[in-house]
């Protein structure tokens, strides 16, 4: 089973790319971030025509997450628990049945957190990460296959940036951010891409500015975390880098994991 995360950076603006990619890449489950639309305006019909079930947690003009799946949803949970005042659409969980049992998949869009001297944005990022850690602790206790897929807005290590010194003042690379990510992983998750390669130049995001794509000036901020039960089915992980060269691309590219949990 192929599970992919992709920050689409506006689903309606890049619908043509999305439809082409769904046919080319053929993911069984696709987790999208930054759909930037309310649920009612999500291009559901075009995606369903390709054989996908669609669930969204949208927001007008900003944020928004979705899960597209060839499997039927058994359950859908929207919003990260822990703060009822948080209205930002950044989290959706789908529960599925496979021939190996239950599978839980989350599409998440972690706050950017910049600028770090803002008295709201960086604390919100760290608070959101703490809530995610608490939620994940509870889910891991279920001892079920769980995939946390998304744009984490975290550069885990210096090797995950072409020029790490350029990110020293950025929320994505602050010590507190990286420590929070390590605490999450250390709950027992396998970080899929780094489980397969420790090579430098392994990036998932290239900014639109200053010729970043042409210079391969990238960073790795899109991650797939696998619970121990999901890691038991882990086959491979790949970054579909070529998508960044398409016309009107997102600044992120799809990141995929293959799990041997049975055919759809």
Image: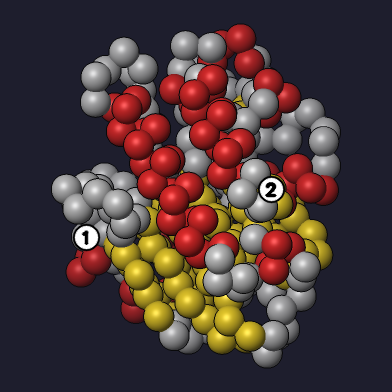
Compared with 42, 148 (above or below) is above
> Which residue is drawn at the image coordinates 44% and 85% (left, top)?
74
Q: Is residue 224 visible?
A: yes
Return the residue nearer the eye: 241 or 67. Answer: 67
Badge number at residue 191: 2
The tally of labels here is 2
Residue 80 coordinates in the image, percent (x, y):
34, 55
User: Can you tell which of label 2 and label 1 is closer to the viewer?
Assistant: 2
Q: As drawn, is 53 to the left or to the right of 206?
A: left
Residue 256 lies, in percent from the top left, at 66, 57
Q: Residue 30 shows which numbered tag?
A: none
Within-10-Å neighbours for mark 1: few <14, some 14–19, many 20+: some
| Farthest left residue in view | 85
Q: Is residue 240 visible?
A: no
Q: Is residue 210 left or right of residue 93?
A: right
Q: Residue at x 47, y 11 (%)?
A: 169
* Residue shown at 70% from the left, 62% from the top: 228
Sequence-earlier tag: 2 or 1: 1
The Cα atoms of the two marked residues, 2 and 1, are separated by 31 Å
Relative depth, front residue between 74 and 40: 74
Quadrant in which residue 15 is drawn: bottom left
Residue that mark 1 sits on: 38
Q: 176 or 193: nearer the eye?
A: 176
Q: Is residue 18 above or below residue 50?
A: above
Q: Is residue 24 above or below residue 35?
A: below
Q: Residue at x 51, y 51 (%)?
A: 150
- Residue 121 location in percent, x, y? 29, 27
Residue 232, horizontal then vertical, whole percent: 77, 68
Judge from the rendering whether residue 13 lies leftward or rightward of residue 204; answer left or right.
left
Quarter placement of the N terminus: bottom right
């Amino acid at each position: 089973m192929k599970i992919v995360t992709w920050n689409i950076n506006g689903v309606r603006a890049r619908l043509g790319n999305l439809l082409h990619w769904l046919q080319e890449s053929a993911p069984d489950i696709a987790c999208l971030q930054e759909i930037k639309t309310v649920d009612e305006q999500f291009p559901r019909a075009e995606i369903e025509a390709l054989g996908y079930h669609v669930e969204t947690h949208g927001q007008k003009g900003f944020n928004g997450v979705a899960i597209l799946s060839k499997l039927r949803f058994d359950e859908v949970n929207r919003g990260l628990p822990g703060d009822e005042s948080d209205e930002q659409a950044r989290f959706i969980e789908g529960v599925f049945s496979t021939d190996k049992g239950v599978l839980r998949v989350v599409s998440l869009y972690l706050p950017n957190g910049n600028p770090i001297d803002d008295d709201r944005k960086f604390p919100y990022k760290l608070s959101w990460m703490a809530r995610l850690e608490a939620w994940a602790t509870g889910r891991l206790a279920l001892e079920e296959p769980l995939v946390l897929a998304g744009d984490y807005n975290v550069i885990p290590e210096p090797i995950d940036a072409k020029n790490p010194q350029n990110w020293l003042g950025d929320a994505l690379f602050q010590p507190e951010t990286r420590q929070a990510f390590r605490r999450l992983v250390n709950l027992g998750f396998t970080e899929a891409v780094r489980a397969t390669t420790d090579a430098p130049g392994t990036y998932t995001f290239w900014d639109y500015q200053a010729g970043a794509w042409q210079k391969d000036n990238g960073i790795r901020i899109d991650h797939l975390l696998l619970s121990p039960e999901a890691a038991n089915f882990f086959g491979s992980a790949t970054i579909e880098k070529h998508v960044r060269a398409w016309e009107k691309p997102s600044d992120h590219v799809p990141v995929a994991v293959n799990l041997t949990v049975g055919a759809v």
